[in-house]
Image (cartoon, rainbow, N blue to C red):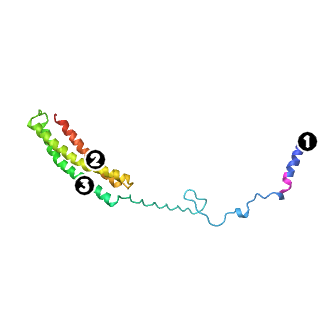
Amino acid sequence: MLIGTALSAALSACAGASDDYPSLAIREVERVRGGFDVPPCGECVEDAQCVAPSPAPTPTPAPPPELPTSYAQRTAALLADVRAADAAFQSSLATARNRVAAARGAALGTPAWGSAQVALADLTSKRSATAIPVTDLEKLAVEIELEQLPNIQMRDAYQEAVRIIQAQDDALEGLYAQVSR
């Protein structure tokens, strides 16, 4: 019983002097007034008008930096040389294919075999003529890289040149495989 009396006295002391503590009621400054930003759709509060935010404008990407004119002209000229050499290769390719087909199964030293060998040598020479501007493109690519210039145009030109020379190599390899040596 003594404990109950002590507990009652302690509780009455807490409840007794209410003027010493602030009220827990909402104060005037805590009341919502004025305007506020409406949250985006799906997050609207009660009767607020929901306005979807306008999408942020997407920045237009800057065009890729270009090579200085002198490098661009040299790159274009070398690629033109590669294409011209490939045109010469392509014009001789049909003749080489015909001669190789005629020499298929022919013995070494026969006229058909000799004609195929001459056609293949001519085609190989034209492939070498293609390799020269490709090598010059490689040198120019290294120069551009060392000067830390934009190299998108160079890269595209070089990739085209490599595709051309690879196609020539594949054609030659296939033809040489058909002729006995």
Q: Which residue is pictured at 34% across the width and 50% down the height?
A: 142
Image check: 80 left or right of 67? left
| Residue of label 3 | 80
Q: Main secondary structure of the magenta part?
A: helix
Residues at discs 3 and 1 in contact (Cβ within 8 Å): no
Look at the numbered discs 2 and 1 and tell me whether their residues touch, using CB distance below 8 Å: no
Q: Position of residue 165 (x, y in %)?
A: 25, 46
Q: Nearer the viewer, mark 3 or mark 1?
A: 3
| Residue 155 appears in view | no
Q: Is residue 165 magenta?
A: no
- Name the residue that disc number 1 marks: 2
Q: Which residues are magenta?
A: 14-18
- Residue highlighted by disc 2: 163
Residue 125: percent from left, percent from top: 19, 45
Measured Cα–Cα span from mark 3 to mark 1: 110 Å
Residue type highlighted by circle 1: Leu
Q: Secondary structure at mark 1?
A: helix
The span from disc 2 to disc 3 (Cα, nearest Å) is: 14 Å
Secondary structure category for the residue under label 2: helix
